[in-house]
């Protein structure tokens, strides 16, 4: 089976505490992760990352940059994931996956150890 590239984003915001990163929980294990998912037919990776952020994390914003292409562990294999920096300008009160996930803002340091 060909490995499809997924798209995700690193949602950030600037606050009086410094830069913060938004993480969400995975559906099944509850691990803290970035919003990410499959790229739909005819969709660009950048657009898919923005869509996944809205669906999974309930945030909207502007893509600032591409962080790169990473290999994400997936069982006994790994899959390519293209990650973009998303500067958040809107946090939604309700979103499609709000009953399946939690979200939390972390300092950059704390996000690395979450």
Image (cartoon, rainbow, N blue to C red):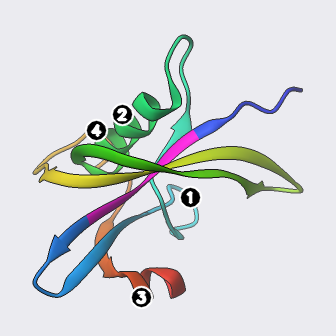
CA–CA distance between discs 2 and 1? 21 Å
Cα–Cα span, label 4 and label 1: 17 Å
Residue 25 point in image, percent of width and height: 44, 64
SS label for mark 4? loop
Q: Which mark is residue 51?
A: 2
Residue that badge 4 annotates: 96
In this view, which residue lies farthest toward the top? 42
Instruction: Locate residue 87: give its quadrant.
Output: bottom left
Q: Which residue is mark 3?
A: 110
- The x and y percentages for residue 33 are 50, 64
Report the side of 87 relative to 33 (left or right).
Answer: left
Rendered-image quadrant of the N terminus: top right
Please tell me whether mark 4 or mark 1 is closer to you in this view.
4
Q: For the residues labelled 4 and 3, say whether their Cβ atoms are less than 8 Å apart.
A: no
Instruction: Point out the stretch of residues depicted in magenta.
Output: 7-12
Q: Classify residue 92 as left or right of residue 86.
A: left
Which residue in the structure is indicated by mark 1?
28
Distance CA(mark 4)–CA(mark 2):
11 Å
Name the one closer to the observer, 95 or 89: 89
Q: Earlier in the sequence, mark 4 or mark 1?
A: 1
Task: Categorize mark 3 by other alpha carbons within 10 Å: few (<14), some (14-19), many (20+).
Answer: few
Q: Earlier in the sequence, mark 2 or mark 1?
A: 1
- Residue at image point 22% right, 66% down: 13
Mark nearer the viewer, 1 or 3: 3
Which residue is more in the foreground, 29 or 24? 24
State how far apart marks 4 and 3 are (Cα): 27 Å
């Amino acid at each position: 089976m060909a490995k499809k590239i997924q798209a995700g984003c690193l949602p950030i915001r600037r606050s009086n505490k410094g830069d913060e990163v938004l993480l969400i929980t995975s559906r099944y294990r509850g691990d803290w992760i970035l919003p990410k998912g499959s790229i739909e037919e005819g969709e660009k990776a950048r657009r898919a990352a923005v869509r996944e952020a809205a669906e999974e994390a309930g945030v909207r914003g502007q893509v600032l940059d591409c962080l790169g292409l990473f290999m994400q562990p997936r069982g006994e294999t790994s899959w390519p994931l293209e990650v973009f920096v998303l500067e958040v300008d809107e946090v939604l009160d309700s979103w499609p996956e709000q009953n399946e996930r939690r979200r939390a803002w972390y300092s950059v340091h704390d996000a690395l150890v979450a």
